[in-house]
Amino acid sequence: MIKDIFERIKETPGPLGQYQGIGDGYFMFPRLVGEIGPEMEFNGKPVLNWSLNNYLGLANHPEVRKADAEAAAKFGLGAPMGARMMSGNTDYHIKFENDFSEFVGKKAGLCLNFGYQGMISIIDVLTSRKDVIVYDSESHACILDGMRLSLV
């Protein structure tokens, strides 16, 4: 018998199920409080926040905030306008990649929109159908998806 998905969630709520009483009965979105950064408050307790693309806490650094405000004043809040593959490559992308690769002492670099895209791309480029990939079952979804997509 096929069960209603919401009934299944009530019976076997998964890792966030312990918080379903806080939400609307089925699931909840974690409510993080405080300045966006690597440490925030969750359910009244300080926690490390690995859910943001701000692992080093640089988003709140005064120089980064200043550069962000200057870029918003120059380009508006919609820039960049989407995935580079769809919206196009700009001189700013190229300059950043060149500056960064020089900074880390490499011949070239490639800036991707997010780590998920990077892992999927890297696994696809480095492996073939004949390779064996050994991985931890707790690997991030981007690694698992990268492995699955590399088999196509």
Image: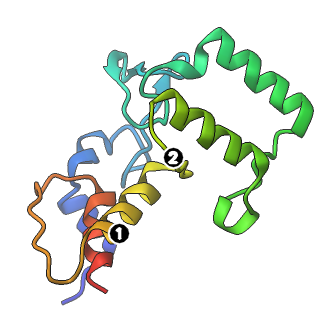
Q: Which mark is residue 109?
A: 2
First-in-chain label (1 vs 2): 2
* In the depicted structure, whether residue 32 falls above or below residue 75: above
Q: Dot 2: few (<14), some (14–19), or many (≥20) neighbours within 10 Å?
A: some
The image quadrant of residue 39 is top left
Query: Residue 63: x and y, percent?
Result: 67, 12
Relative height, residue 117 to residue 27 (above, below): below
The figure's colour scheme reads: rainbow
Res. 6 visible in picture: no
- In the image, 32 versus 106, the foreground residue is 106
Please state the horizontal and vertical placement of residue 138, each as a whole percent of the image: 15, 52
On screen, residue 27 above or below 47: below
Residue at 55%, 48% (x, y): give it. Answer: 111
On the image, the x and y values in percent for residue 67 come to 75, 21
Q: Is residue 13 left or right of residue 61?
A: left
Left or right: 144, with 64 as reference point: left
| Image quarter hosting the N terminus | bottom left
**The C terminus: image quadrant:** bottom left
Q: Mark 1 points at which residue?
A: 125
